[in-house]
Image (cartoon, helix red, strand yellow):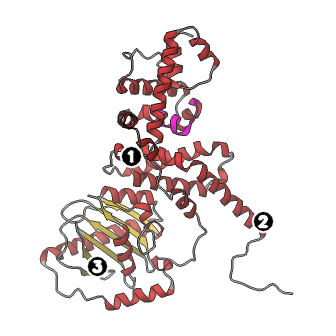
Amino acid sequence: MMNEITDQPVMDSSTQDSDQQRRQRYEQLVDTCYQDVYRYGFWLCKNQALAQDLVQETFLRAWRSLDSLQSDKAAKAWLFTILRRENARLYERYRPDLVDVEDVPIAEADDREPDRRMDRDLLHSAINRLDSDYRDPLLLQVIGGFSGKEIAEILDLNSNTVMTRLFRARSKLRDMFGTSEPERDDPDNNEN
Amino acid sequence: MDDNEFRLRAFSEPGSEDPDLHEAARGDSTRQRLMQEIAELEEHISSAIDTVAVPSGLADRLKQQVEPARTGKRGLMRFFPVAAMVVIAAAITLMPDPGNRPGAQDLAFHDELVTHLHDEAAAYDDEGSTRWAEVSGVLAAAGLAAGNGGASTSGIPLRTAGLKFARHCDLGDAGRGAHIVLEGEQGPVSVILSINKPVDRAFIIEDERFQGRIIPTEYGNMVIVGEQGEILSGYETMVADSVQWSI
């Protein structure tokens, strides 16, 4: 018996399985990482609409090159790297006036206690005032949960530089937040 | 471990379970107090950074954006079912002729626009495609916004409309605007949103190559231009629905 001729694309079952597996892998990636990727994107570009676009571009690129991701354990660092690259491309050409990061909607659960809200607002402002050299590794560590070595790879720095910058970031926040003893000299200066 | 190394490690990795670090703090009340203080600070920092609200529905949008490709039709018309195409055609027929001849200032804008289109055509004719992030950036710089990928009430997100090109546009007297080019049925379709004096009334662009309209808006003008034969009313609706002024 001859096969019926259709105008549908010809796909064998193994191709369909493979496509389905790829899609499932992508969706798992979205479910696992999208919140952290969005938060990191927001802190990088400080604008909700741009952050959403950045995240969408990031995941679109991730989808296209999903096969190049060897281990799902490395997925978050991979996505953060893509997002950083997208953000750099965007801002190399365009620098629109941005909404201040302090205007960002905050998750409701944290908004109930006035003292906590005030602390949070102070810190939002303080983090925003940090030089990006210090803010970047801090965000990667806090949002991404990356180790010093992983941050060094993402930022293309050496590990000692990353540790020094993390030290300085927290020292400055401690000073701005007003709870600290007077700042002492850097214990280590491995910037290069 | 000396004080400098202790401080570096305590500040750079709060919450570290490194036994050397904890051993170095044992029996030293100053170091223990510092570690406690850093732990409290870290709780505040994490709370401040992590409480940024993530937009609802974002995960679904990220999943939907990689849905299998649609049919091979080019241009905006690929998004309309047959019934919708009939409505569009009717709308074109019924659309009132702009009629009265525009004033001198509006004509000057028209001429500047046509010159601009011919100048820019060389750039975007060769352009393959552009990313939504670039389009979004150009819009934002011009005082415009298209959230949710430019989702519109007509259901066609601007980001899916075959984006070819996005550039700042200093057309008119205000020097602020956006020129976006989409892939149409007959060739490129330009969408120009300029912040300048709105024309008195919508009027047709006259040119050998291009056809379209200049339409006054609240803060300036919206221009939709395509090659001869391109049906543009769908683009007018889509852009008007999906882009907002944010100035």
User: Label 3 vs label 2: CA separation?
Assistant: 51 Å
On residue B213, which mark appears?
3
Task: Indicate the chain on which mark 2 is placed.
Answer: A
Closer-to-camera residue (B50/B239):
B50
Specify which label sits upstream in the sequence, 1 or 2.
2
Closer-to-camera residue (A88/B57):
B57
Question: Residue shown at 45%/39% (left/top)?
Answer: B49
Question: Which quadrant would residue A174 be assigned to in this image?
Answer: top left
Q: Which of marks 1 and 2 is in front?
A: 1
On residue A14, which mark appears?
2
Is residue A166 in view from this perspective?
Answer: yes
Q: Position of residue B77 (x, y in %)?
A: 47, 80
The stretch in magenta equals A138-148
Magenta segment: does it hold B75? no
| Discs 1, 2: same chain | yes
Q: Where is residue A146 in the image (x, y as percent from the top left)?
A: 57, 35
Q: Where is residue B84 in the image (x, y as percent from the top left)?
A: 46, 85
Q: Mark 1 points at which residue?
A: A46
User: Label 1 vs label 2: CA separation?
Assistant: 44 Å
